[in-house]
Amino acid sequence: MQTRPTDPRPADAALVLACLALTVLAVKTPWSPLPWPVVAVAGALGSAAVWFRRRWPMAAAVTGAGTFALTGNPGPLLIGLYHGARYAPRRSGWLCGLAAWAGFVGWSWFDSGQVTIDNVAFPPLGIGLVVLAGINLATRDELLVSLQEQARRAESERLLRDGQARAAERTRIAREMHDVLAHKVSLIALYAGALELRATDDPKLRDGTALIRTTAREALVDLREVLGILRTDVAPAPGSATAGQFPDLSALVGASSRAGHPVELHDEAGDLPAATARVVYRIVQEGLTNAHKHAPQAPTTVSVSRNGDGNVAVAVHNETGAAPMDLPGSGAGLVGLAERIRLVGGSLRSGPVAGEGWRLSAVVPWLDPRSEFR
């Protein structure tokens, strides 16, 4: 794709009209000793070739050279030569220059009946400049197209990474949902079965508990069909928070401090529901990971508190530290974290603080199902 105006036809028409005007001058002046009908026809053909100079650049260059040889009209010659050098295959560009040089020699022969050294030696200088200009713009166009393609590829890869991060985060959440809900539903089925065995004297109660037990088993089967495929038997990393393991922020902060990264924890939220605690743990974990990578040994503060709405406010703020560590990263950690928080109804913000380092903050809802029944 060449970089040119969306609709090049107005410019093409203007160039054709300009070449026709020069053809009229070539007939009236005259610029060639040939009969004026020959000059007029050759000039008209050369002007018409200008319109097709992008589609057939070599033909336009050769036609322009022939037009100049017969009429002395330089318009089709220069336009055809320039666009031949710009749009023709690079290995064929020299043929455009050779055709233009032959056009100069032919015009000299028709005009004076002889070819001098000046007619042979000097035209290649001007021809070379025009060819170089065409090749330079062709190279610029190719570079621009390459950069645009690289930008599109980079954007596609970024969107792909973001999608993969969101999918991975949803997969982790689905695994946790499967573990937690499967356990809860299996308990419901177990309690309903026990109650059914004891309710021998009340047929209605026995039928109701049997229905609860059957429905719980069906729900468990449906749940495993939908989410069971997402489970993997990958062992969790040491110190990570998994379903059934209550996240410990103190241990997470202590590990960073023992590694030489000073971290202060201000936990004013108290005990958190397990679901909220897991999300808070992931936020602090991501914030400390980024601080380790981008601001090693910089003083960092972790704050966890309840806001006026009863939600949990989490913030990880690190000051400016030493040079960033040369650690690999996918750049999708915050993307996955934002998707995880969005799915539970929270919000996440991150960015530099003027002269004070970097701050990662989030608001996480109080995810306690028991509060709905209070």
Image (tube, rainbow, N blue to C red):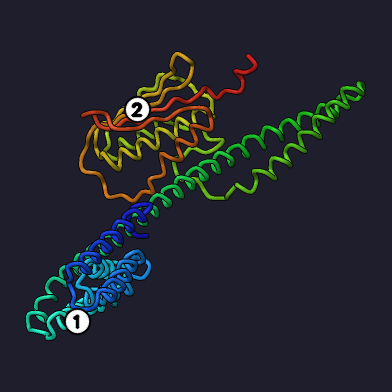
Which of 306 and 37 lies nearest the eye of the viewer? 37
Please tell me which residue lies in front, 233 or 107. 107
- Indicate the amino acid at tag 1: Gly
- Cα separation, mark 1 vs mark 2, equals 84 Å
Residue 151 spot, x, y in % from top left: 35, 52
Q: Residue furthest bottom?
A: 114
Position of 116 compared to 329: left or right?
left
Q: Is residue 362 left or right of residue 99?
A: right
| Quarter of image, res 189 | top right
Q: Quadrant of residue 89?
A: bottom left
Q: Crowdedness of circle 1 by 10 Å Cα count: few (<14), some, many (20+)?
A: many
Q: Residue 325, position in %: x, y? A: 26, 46
Residue under the point 35% across and 40% down? 289
Q: How many marks?
A: 2
Q: In this view, does 206 lie to the left or right of 71?
A: right
Q: Mark 1 points at which residue?
A: 106
Is the N terminus in the top left, top right, bottom left or bottom right quadrant? bottom left
- Residue 302's disc is 2
SS state under label 1? helix
Nearest to N terminus: mark 1 or mark 2: 1
Q: What residue type is labelled 2?
A: Val
